[in-house]
Amino acid sequence: MSFIRLEPRGQASPLWVYGAPLLAVALTLVSGFLLFWAMGFNPVAALHAFFVAPLTSARGIGELVVKATPLTLCAVGLAVGFRANVWNIGAEGQLTLGAVTGGGLALAFYGEGGWWLLPLMVAGGIAGGMAWAAIPAFLRTRFNASEILTSLMLTYVALLLLSYLVHGPYRDPDGFAFPESRLFEEAATLPVLVSGTRIHLGALFALAAVAGCWVLVARTFVGFQIRVIGLTPAAAGYAGFKEKKIIWLTLLLSGGLSGLAGLGEVAGPIGQIVPSVSPGYGFTAIIVAFLGRLHPVGIVLAALLMALSFIGGEAAQIGLGLPKAITGVFQGMLLFFLLGSDVLIRYRVRVGARKTVSQGATA
Amino acid sequence: MSIEVAGPVIAAMMTAATPLLFAALGELVVEKSGVLNLGVEGMMLGGAVVGFAAAVLTGSSAVGFVAGALAGLLLAALFGVLTLGLFTNQVATGLALTLFGVGLSSLVGQGYVGHPIADVPELHIPVLTDLPIIGQPLFGQSLPVYLALAAVPAVHWFLFRTRAGLVLRAVGENHTAAHALGYKVIRIRFLAVLFGGAMSGLGGAYLSLDYTPMWAEGMTAGRGWIALALVVFATWKPGRVLAGAWLFGGVTILQLHAQGVGFAVPSQLLSMLPYLATVLVLVLISRDVTRIRLNAPASLGKIFYPD
C-alpha cells in the first residue's frame, strides 16, 4: 500500500534502544539549526552560543552540575512512578513545597541555627514534597481521581502559595517590601563542594538518590512489582500485587525527592526564598526521565543535557535577546524526537511497495 | 448580590466559561475517538499567540480567530503524527506538546507582550440587549461566545445523531473491532485530533483576542488542564461540559469579585480557587467508578497497531 511502511520486529532492537536517544539529540540540533536560521540568526553561531559556549569555562561546567542536581532528584523519582504507570506530573509543585517547608524552617530558626538546622531542613523539605504528593496519592487510591490532573492542579496551588508566602509571612522584614525572604544564615546553607563553583551538597544527594532508586527498581521485590504493574497490570492483579500500595510508594518517593530538590535550591544556589524557585525543573524532569529511558544512569546523562538547555536558554537570552522560553522549545522538540524515534526499537522502516502475498501458498 | 450586578456577573461568567467550552468540547471529541491528548494547554497557548499576532498584523479579529484555530490544528497534527503514526505514548507526547507550546508561544509572542488591541465588539441587538438583567448576558456578548454555545448541541448532534459520530465512537470503544469492520481507525482518530486542536486554538484565541485582550506569556494559566478535567467531570457528555464550564466560569468570577471588593483574603489564596475547585469536582465525579467506566471510551489512551 503505502510506500514507506513500518514492519514489526520480532524483538526489540538493542541497537536502537541506545541509538534512539542519540538520533533524537541529533534531530533536535538539526531543527534548532533551522529554527535559528528561520529567525534570522547565524545558526552555527547561535547553536554555539546556546550549547557550546557555556561549557568552555569552569564556572559554566559548575553551573551545569548545579542545574542537573534538581533535575536528577526529580527525574529519578518520577521514573520509578512512570514504570508503574503512575503519572505524577506535579513534581514542580512538590519541589515548590519542599522549598516552602524546608526553607521555612531556616526562617523559623533564623539567628539560632546550629549543626542540627540543615538536617532538619532537609527532612522538612522531603516531608513537604511528600505531603504534597500524598494528596494525589490519596485522591487516586481513595476516589479514583486521575493523578495527572490533581498533581498538576496542585502545582498551580503550590506556586500561588509560594507567592503568598514571599509577599506575606516569609517576607524579609528589612527588605524594603521586595517579595523575598531574608538571606539564609550560614548554618542554613548547603555547603559548597567545589570552591569557585556553586556545586553544593545537593549534588551528592542526587547521586545517592540515583543509586537508591536503581537498587529499589532492579534489586528488590517492590521494584519487581513496580515493573510488572507497569508492563502488564492484569498479571500484577492475578499475582496479588497491591496496586494502591505501589501508587502510594511511588508518589511519596517522587514527591519526597522533588521536595529535597526544592530545598536544595533555596538552601543552595539561591540562598533565600524567592517568588520563582525553579525555572520549571519539575516539568523538565519528565523529559529527563524519558530521555534517560527511566534508567538511573541514563537519567544522570539526560539531566546534564537538559541542564545545558537551561544554561543555553540563559545565554541565548543575554547574547541573542531571545526569551528564556526557547529552552522549552528545545526541550519539547527533544522529547518529540525521542518518543518518535523509539518506533525504531520495535519496528523496521521498509521502503518500497509491499510484496503481495501469494494466495494459497500456505496450504 | 443585588439585582443590578446580577446581569454583569452572569455575563462575566459566560465569557470566563467560553475558552474552557471550546477546548473541552474539542478534547471530548478526541477522547471519544479513543485518544488522550494532554497537550490542550500547549495548543491553547499556540492559538492565543498566533491568533493575537494575526489580529495585530491584519487588524481583523476574525482573521485572528481563524489563525488561532489553524495554529491549534497544526500543533495537534504534530501530536497525531507521533501518537497515531509512530505509536508514541499518548501521555508523554501530550506533555511534550504542552512544554513545546509554552516555549514556542513565548518565542513567537515576544514582540507582542503588552501590545494593546481593540477587543471583539459585542453584539447589540436593539430591545433584546436592553432588557434588564438578562439582556446583556444573553444578547450582548461577542460572537465567539455564541459560537462556543452553539458548539455544544452541534457536537452532541454529531456524536450521537450521525453515522460519522457513531463510527467515531465505535473506534473509541474498540479499535480492533472497528478496524475489522473496515473503518480507517487511524484516519478517523487523526481527524478527531485535528478538530480538538482547532477547538483548543479557538479557545486560546478567545483569551488573547477578546477575554483579556492582550498577549502575555503563559496566559492560559492552566485552563487547558481544567478543560481536560471538565471532560471527565462531564463524563464525556457535551451538555455537561456546558454545565462544568459555567461552574468554573462562576468560580473564576467569584474569585475576581472577591478581590475587587477588597475581601480580606490575600489575592493568591483566592486565585487558588479554580484549581482547588477542579480537584474537588474531579474527586466527586471520579469516585463513582461505575459511571466513569460506563462512559469513558474503552480504548482511551490505548495504542492501535494496524496489522
Image: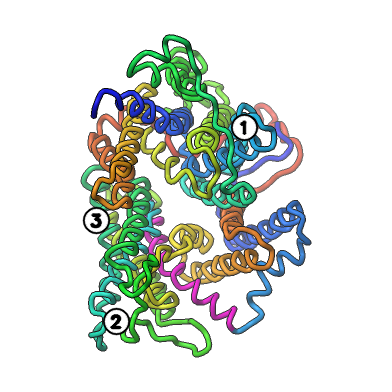
B136, above or below A71, in the image: above
User: Nearer the observer, disc 2 or disc 1?
Assistant: 1
Amino acid type shown at disc 1 = Gly
- Say above or below: B69 vs A269: above
* Residue A200 horizontal/vertical position (percent): 43, 82
SS at badge 2? helix
Pointer 2 and pointer 3: residues touching (CB < 8 Å)?
Answer: no
User: Local crowd at mark 1 within 10 Å, few (<14), some, or many (≥20)?
Assistant: many
Image quadrant for the C terminus of chain A? top right
Distance from Cα at disc 2 to Cα at disc 3: 31 Å
Q: Amino acid at mark 2?
A: Leu
Tell me which residue sits at (63%, 82%) in the image: A57
The quarter of the displayed image where residue B209 is located: top right
Please give the residue where the numbered disc 3 appears in the rendered image: A245
Quadrant of res B185: top right
Question: Is residue A73 located in the magenta-colored stretch of the structure?
Answer: yes
Image color mode: rainbow
Q: CA separation, marks 1 and 3?
A: 50 Å
**Picture disc at residue B64:** 1
